[in-house]
């Protein structure tokens, strides 16, 4: 039986308190990581044509910090862990639709950071935001 993360996420969205210790983007990221480990332990591996959600988020928000996980990027964009969780469930269908379309057409697509998005200007603004609060 092939498992589907998208189906599991529908349950989490509907009743987050059943699946997450707290309503937080980081709790969701931990849930997803655990889900993927469970799949691998049962010899169910992700599709090799899988489009990286991390790269898609980086490109969508033009934030390319190799030290940041997708959950951190969404937290940064949304402002709070709770709002980041809501943002995830808002953007996930868009990502899933793109991924599904390319996999069903057996096409590959690469997402990632545009080089111009990582500039000294960007990092300086980010640094000022972090230290001014």
Image (cartoon, rainbow, N blue to C red):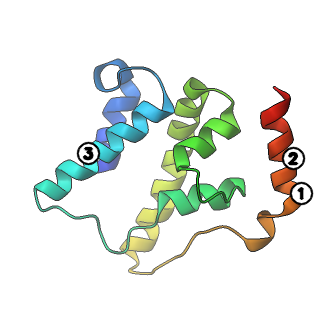
Q: Is residue 37 left or right of residue 85?
A: left
Residue 98 on image: x %, y %: 51, 63
Position of residue 108 relative to residue 50, above or below, is below
- As helix, strand or loop, the secondary structure at mark 3 comes to helix
Q: Residue at x 30, y 26 (%)?
A: 19
Q: Position of residue 129 (x, y in %)?
A: 83, 36
- Residue with the most extreme bottom position: 107
Q: Are marks 3 and 2 in contact (CB under 8 Å)?
A: no
User: Which of disc 2 and disc 3 is earlier in sequence?
Assistant: 3
Residue 35: numbered disc: 3
| Label 1 sits on residue | 121
First in residue order: circle 1 vs circle 3: 3
- Count neighbours of disc 3 (C-alpha within 10 A) and say few if under 14, some if 14 to 19, many if 20 or more: some
| Of marks 3 and 2, the one in the foreground | 2
What is the spatial separation of the Cα atoms under label 3 and label 2, in whole angstroms?
36 Å
Residue found at the far front of this picture? 131
Q: Which residue was labeled with disc 2? A: 125
* Corner quadrant of residue 60: bottom right
Quadrant hosting residue 80:
top right
Mark 2 packing: few (<14 Cα in 10 Å), some, or many (20+)?
few
- Secondary structure at numbered mark 1: helix
Q: Nearer the viewer, residue 35 or 120?
A: 120
Q: Is residue 12 visible?
A: yes
Whether pointer 2 and pointer 1 mark residues with C-beta atoms closer than 8 Å, the reply is: yes
């Amino acid at each position: 039986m092939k498992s589907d993360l998208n189906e599991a996420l529908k349950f989490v969205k509907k009743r987050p308190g059943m699946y997450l210790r707290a309503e937080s983007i980081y709790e969701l990221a931990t849930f997803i990581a655990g889900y993927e480990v469970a799949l691998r332990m049962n010899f169910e591996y992700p599709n090799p044509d899988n489009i990286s959600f991390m790269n898609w988020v980086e490109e969508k928000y033009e934030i390319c910090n190799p030290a940041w996980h997708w959950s951190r990027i969404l937290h940064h964009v949304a402002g709070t862990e709770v709002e980041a969780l809501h943002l995830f469930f808002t953007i996930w269908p868009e990502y899933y639709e793109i991924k599904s379309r390319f996999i069903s057409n057996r096409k590959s697509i690469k997402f990632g950071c545009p080089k111009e998005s990582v500039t000294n200007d960007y990092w300086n603004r980010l640094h000022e935001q972090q230290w001014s609060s």
